[in-house]
Structure formats: structure tokens, C-alpha cells
Image (cartoon, coloured by chain):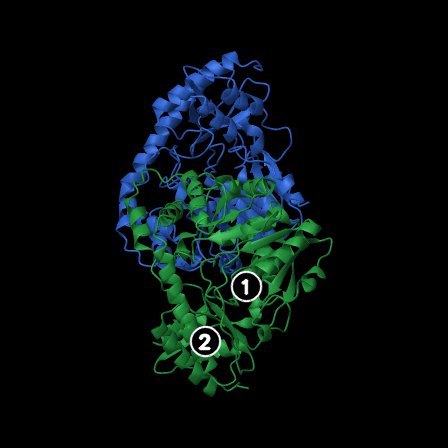
Chain colours: A blue, B green
Amino acid sequence: MTKVSNRSQQLSLSPIRKLVPFADAAEARGTKVYYLNIGQPDIKTPPKAIQRLKETPIDILKYSPSSGINSYRKKLPKYFKRYGIQVVPEDIMITTGASEAIFLSLMAIMDIGDELIIPEPFYANYSGFAAMAGVKIVPVTSSIENNFALPPVHFIQEKITPKTKAILLCNPNNPTGYVYPRSVLEELSSIVKAKGIYLIIDEVYREFVYNDTPFCSGLELPGMKQEIVIVDSISKRYSACGARVGSIITRNHALLRAILKYAQFRLSSPGLGQILAEAAIDLAPTYLEEVTTEYDRRRQHLFARLSAIPKVICYLPEGAFYLFAQLPIDNADRFCQWLLESFSHEGQTVMLAPGSGFYASPGLGEKEIRIAYVLNTKDLDAAMDCLEIALAKYPGRD
Amino acid sequence: MTKVSNRSQQLSLSPIRKLVPFADAAEARGTKVYYLNIGQPDIKTPPKAIQRLKETPIDILKYSPSSGINSYRKKLPKYFKRYGIQVVPEDIMITTGASEAIFLSLMAIMDIGDELIIPEPFYANYSGFAAMAGVKIVPVTSSIENNFALPPVHFIQEKITPKTKAILLCNPNNPTGYVYPRSVLEELSSIVKAKGIYLIIDEVYREFVYNDTPFCSGLELPGMKQEIVIVDSISKRYSACGARVGSIITRNHALLRAILKYAQFRLSSPGLGQILAEAAIDLAPTYLEEVTTEYDRRRQHLFARLSAIPKVICYLPEGAFYLFAQLPIDNADRFCQWLLESFSHEGQTVMLAPGSGFYASPGLGEKEIRIAYVLNTKDLDAAMDCLEIALAKYPGRD
């Protein structure tokens, strides 16, 4: 009798996707579901970039170079220059989404059993990539009382052992919306430099910062040529999640050569997505300004609605398009499932991501949920109507 | 000081891609290089499928479901039905190329240290996927004297240990062109069934079979619901290597659920490629017939040219679009590099893949090379002119 691997049996299901069968069943019953569980924006992919892709003559859709289509790699520095960041094409490796960028970075940096420090709550799929790479996540817990700010860096420093090979941040943060101040990034830089380890920063939400302090990229930190590895993607920036185009940017070329070995096995990243991504660099800056303004509007609106619900603990997130809230409930997994299975308000309900899957420490996040404010304010309103009424009716309410 | 992982340092470079810098340098000197090292066909991607992609309205390029776009999964059984193969959408998981299909299959089937039996020579990147998954390849050697036919199956049976979790075949074979007869597949079926292990068959060259015996897919083997895992891709079939669309087909749904966990981490496969792939299913069968006829012409031509070169040992391959030949040289790695670095004939040279990288057993394949007959007969002719003259001039000739 055939079996599946032990390692696959030990994997947790994604908190973002595990309730999908219940949502499908709700829809099959005719219930309208507002999807706030997944970072899939309702913003249009830039029509001009789509048009450019469609106008590109494609004779043979060939393998691209394993590091990415040359013209795209050569053009990306132009995008970074707008943020005052100097990179050269040789610093860039195109990947199949940020997902592959993270996985390959872990493979090239870490060996089996090595330790990766990540502030929690963190993007749940980091657990998956770490499991695939056979490395151990060492969490540093941030809390809703401080709007999920990074705890003082000595808490991180204390976690470093001889097995620690990297610290992984997401800035702006998914799932909390926290934006790392430059001063914190500089403190972390000193630590990784002193220890000879890496600071991997997932910056896929770079554009989505709503406070007045400008976003600080890891690429701006001085004297960090060897240590900094940036993960990027066009998925959120251009609402092109399905293109599967990401990148790794680092000035550490020895590391890029190690990553390239893995990238060569899979031959190349998606060609059509790379054509789209290259076209998007030419978009007027107003495109991203408008998108950011729209997310800001949603953020304010979501915060106002949530704040008005009794006993909901939340805060105004500073970046990305997520809010991690604490609800007056017994258990978020049960509540989120109940929302889909047993609740509807005027034929509608809402899908949320339960919080526990965003923590590596057992027992944390059980009353927390992640909300992705990826829907327009009208839909957000309808979803918040559902949540407010559901919280009043839920049998397991606190 | 930062370091890269030990595991990345231990990786071998792809024999198919490692000479790329020498080819780039040859081109920079103005030498025309015929690329027979890589399975990148010069056949056009079906213009009708490209057109259909371009006509598809794309408003938001969303994540597709982790198992693939539903309409594409639902349509794929129609493609298989043409070959008399019955599958249902629930048997299919769409992947990012056959590369990901193999890697995820290994992750879901095998644990670290488990053993995977593969007849050698084999597609070199299998070594990479095995290394990434932390599993050990146990080779069974086939030889050019038998046109690389599979050795009697007891040779395979003898290699099975408690750690063996799967046998991996490529049928039709890359790099040898060998096509597994139904009788051999049935013998292997009995073995894997008795042992409770898997038979993974990479069938990406399914269409490219040139002898009269019809191709036998693993999906046709009776009573093998649990054991058979098929790897597929549109890369070669539709000359769409850059689309990065493959699939895993198995009637073992417990295995597919294990694979889905990994697939959810990376969210989805490329959306644009899947649209193209779905459109290609509607192509008239004449498209593939014409392509196969063209490869057959090249095969015959290549074989005739190689056979005419003194002391070259080769055979007429039965399938795929590769030929694995033995040359009268000291070392194929040196020869292939010399072709790019130190040789040209009328301003032209040829790039080949050295044979040793296709073996797991040390020391094998050192006089062998893989030729991909992916260029038209005129270009093949020019490339064979180069090879013939190069073999006469090469200082390390036997």
C-alpha cells in the first residue's frame, strides 16, 4: 500500500486557504461571500500593461534565462531608482512570485536544522517554505497592545544561536500592517552584520505605506552589501497575483550564484508574466498613487467600522492592506468556520483568516483574525455589517 | 561574514546550462552558435493559441486556485481522451512546469534520506530536484550498446530497499530517446504494486514517438490507481517552454491532497500560461501530427549525419527529440567547452550537453553527449558540419 511522506503529513494547512471548502459550500447554497481572507485585490491589473503584453509579438514562447528575461532585469533598476534605490541588473534574480524568492533564498542560505528568526504573527506561508527547506522558525512575538510593533531588538538578539542563519521580516507587514522604522532596521542591521547572518526582507507591499514617514527599504541601509536580501513581487503592486513574477535583490553575488543553481533546475520563471511586469515599469507614477489612495480610504473605513464594534480590539495599520484584529470570541478557527457554515445576513457572509495560523508559538492568536482590505468600501461595508451582526449572534462570543 | 548553505555548495551545475558563459563569449566574438544543448525547439508556439490568449479579456490577473484554473482542469480530460486515457479533473493538479510537478511529487512521496530509483542516463535536473528534496538517487545503468533500453527489471528489483519510495522514469526518454514498451511498464507495475511504492512517469514527450508501436502511458496500466503518478507539461507539446505550465495526474487522491498542501504555499501556477494551455487543447490534431513529422525528419537526418562520422557511436532514437551519442574524444566536458572556446568553422560552432551530468554513477558518460534535435534540418546540417570538422581537429580525439 502506498503512503505519503511523513513530512507532508506534518504540514499545517494554510489558514488563508483551509476554509475554502466551507466558502464553496456557502456559495453553493446561494450565500454571497465577501472574501477578506486572501490578499487578492479587486483593483484592476493596469490595462495598459495588459495591452502591451497583448501587443507583444510572440513567435516562440521560449524558456527565459534562469535569472529572468534580460530586458526586464535591465529595466528594473529604473523602477527602484524612483525610490532612491540604486541597484544594477546583476543584483536581481527574477523568480516565480515572492513565494519562490523566499523558498530559494532559504535553500541557498540555510541547511537542514538551521534556525530562521521571524517576528510573529507572520505571513503563514513562511511556515510552509521553512518546512519545505527543513529549517526551524524561531518566533519573536509582537502583540496587538503595541500595534504589533517589533519588540526591542534585544529580544531578537537573545534568540540568535550558532544555528541562526537569517532573520526574516515582512515590511510593510503582512498580516499586521506594521511598517518598520529606519531606526529599527538599522539596529537589526548592526546585529546581523556582527553575527555574519542575513536579513531577508519581504517588501512586496513597498508602495502601500500610509503614514508620513517614508518607507525605508533594506536596500537603503548603508554598508550591508553581504547581509541584505530583498524579496519582491509584482502581485500586489500591479494587482497581478496570477502573473507569478517576483524577484530577489541582493548585492551579495555569491549568494545569487548559489540561488541560481536552484533556479537553473526549474529552468525559468513564467515568460508571459515577465513581459507584463516589464511593461508595468513604464506606467505613470499616478497609477500607484491612485491605488495607494484607494487602499488608504479602505483602511480608514475598515478601522472606523471595526472600532465601532463592541469589544473588538484593533488599531489603524500603517502599511500593506491587512489588519490583525482581536475579536470577542472563544476561538477564531471555529468562528471563521461558523461564519461560512451557519451564518448569513441578508444572504451574505464574510470569510476571514483565523489568527493562530500566523503564529509559530502554540496557543497564540486564537481570538485574532486577519482582514485583507482588498475590497471596495461598499463591499467592505457589507462585510462589516455581516461581521458586526455575526459577533452579536455567535454562540461562542465572549 | 555571511556564507551560503552547504547544500547549495554541493550542487552540481546543470550540464545543459553550465557552458552558457562560454557560448555567450563565442557569440560576443561574432561566432554563430547552434544550440543543440537545450530542449528549446525552434517550432512556433501555436499561433491560434497565442491569439486566443490575446483575445481573452483580462480585468484582474488573479491568483488561480492552487490546483489550477478550474476550466483548464475540466478541459484536460478531453486532451487525454484522444489517447484513449480516461481521467477526471479531480485526478489533475496544475503545476509550474514539469519541474515543479516532479519536485512536489518527491516532497509528497518521500522523506529526507529516502531512495528514488532512476534508470541512467536521466534528465539532469532530476538530480537537482532530488537534492532539493533531500532524497538519494539510486541509478540503474542502461547502455548505448542496447540503445539505452531498460536493463532487465530484476536489475531494478535488486535495488529496492526499505528506503525506496519510488521509481522515476521518463517516457519517451530524455536524454536517450528510448520508448518503454508496454510489457516493460507492466513488469515495473507488478514490482511497485508488490512493494507498495510509486512509479512516477515523466511523459512530457508523449506525442513524440516515431516507431509503429503506439506509446503506452502509465495511465493505461490496469489496476494501478494508487501507484502511478504522471508528470506532464505543455512546454514541448506546444513549444511553449516559457509558459511554465505542467501537471501531475494521478488517481491517488490521498497523494494529490498531500501535494496540494505544498501547492497552496506557492498559491498558484502562472495564470497567463494556463489560459494559453487551455486554448491549445482546442487545436486541430493536425498541429501535433505536423510537429511530430518534422521531428521525425530531423531525427532521421541527424542519425544519418552522425552515422557517417567515423567512430561516432549512435542509434536511431525512438522518441522525444534527443540522441545520446558516444564520440571519439577524451572527455566530453572538455570537448564541449573547446567547441565554444577554441573552435569555429566558417564562423560557426555547435553547443552540446556533455554526457556525465546525465549519470548519477561517477565516471560514466565521459565520452557521451546529448544532442537535442530542436533545430530545422538546414541548421542541423550546419551544426553537424561543425561537429564533423571539430572531431577531426580536436586535440583530445581518440
Q: State whether discs 1 and 2 lie on one chain.
A: yes
The chain ID associated with circle 2 is: B
Which residue is found at the position 47% from the left and 56% from the top? A251
Which residue is found at the position 56% from the left and 79% from the top? B331
Residue for badge 2: B303
Q: Amino acid at mark 2?
A: Phe
Q: Mark 1 vs mark 2: which is more N-terminal?
A: 1
Q: Amino acid at mark 1?
A: Ala
Q: Is residue B286 visible?
A: yes
Q: Nearer the viewer, mark 1 or mark 2?
A: 2
Counting from the top left corner in percent of width and height, residue B392 is at: 46, 87
Seen in the picture, residue A173 relative to B243 is either above or below; the reply is above
Seen in the picture, residue A200 relative to A366 is either above or below; the reply is below
Q: Viewer-proximal residue, B347 or B41?
A: B41
Q: Is residue B114 visible?
A: no
Q: Is residue A258 left or right of residue B151?
A: left
Q: Is residue B198 left or right of residue A71?
A: right
Query: Hey, which quadrant is residue B188 in on the image?
Result: bottom right
Q: Which mark is residue A177?
A: none
Is disc 1 surrounded by few (<14), some (14 to 19) or many (20+) residues within 10 Å? Answer: many
Q: Is residue B361 left or right of residue A187?
A: right
* Circle 1 SS class: loop
Counting from the top left corner in percent of width and height, residue A156 is at: 60, 40
Residues at discs 1 and 2 in contact (Cβ within 8 Å): no
